[in-house]
Image (spheres, rainbow, N blue to C red):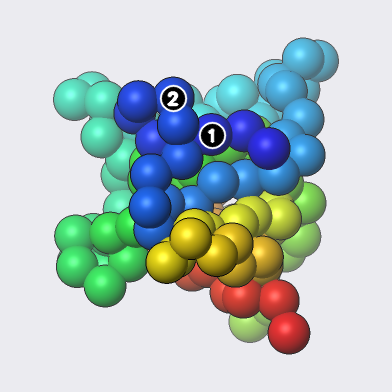
Amino acid sequence: MLPLSGSGLAAEGAITTLGIAGLAGNASRAGVIASVIGESGALRTSQTVANHLATDRSFIPSQAVTETIKGGARVGDAQGAAGHFMYTSEASMQVGGKASQGFLEVLVDEVKGIISHVLFKSAP
């Protein structure tokens, strides 16, 4: 498991992604990462995602989002939006000393370089 909080240790309530593959030999993923990181170093997101990451989904760090894009499974948008791709990776979250296993979803508009959806889903 890769710790993704700034201290190098998974913080209480922070998401960590599992089984992340590197970018070796994957220039297209590197291009997506470059497109979703603004000049300031912050993620380029829709206003809705920015609001979620600042409030009810603040436990999802930017590094978990970029790691999911780097190494997660990539499929076309389920709603068929052209140029949109969903990246999904296994993830876990520590809450009250217990790990919640699940998946982190990141939807990217690869034409505009904007993240339009970020969600942690607990496994059933």
Three-letter code for the amino acid on which mark 2 is drawn: Gly
Q: Quadrant of the N terminus?
A: top right
Which of 44/83 is in front?
A: 44
The label number, if any, that marks residue 100 in the structure image: none
Q: Is residue 90 left or right of residue 64?
A: right
Query: Three-letter amino acid code at disc 1?
Result: Pro
Which quadrant would residue 105 be assigned to in this image?
A: bottom right
Alpha carbon distance from label 2 to label 1: 6 Å
| Label located before the other in sequence (2 or 1) | 1
Residue 3: assigned label: 1
Residue 93: where, in percent of width, then height? 52, 59
Quadrant housing the C terminus? bottom right
The residue furthest front is: 97
Which of the 4 image quadrants contains residue 8? top left
Nearer to me, 51 or 11: 11
Q: Point out residue 34 in the picture as x, y percentages from the top left corner.
A: 46, 26
Q: Which residue corresponds to the image point at 55% horizontal and 65% vertical from the top-left?
A: 98
Where residue 111 appears, x then y in whole percent?
50, 48
Residue 49 seen in this snapshot:
no
The residue drawn where x is 34% and y is 28% is 6
Give the residue at mark 2: 8
| Residue under the point 46% across and 40% down | 10
Q: Residues within 10 Å of mark 2 (few under 14, many from 20)?
A: few
> Please, what secondary structure does the residue beneath circle 2 have?
loop
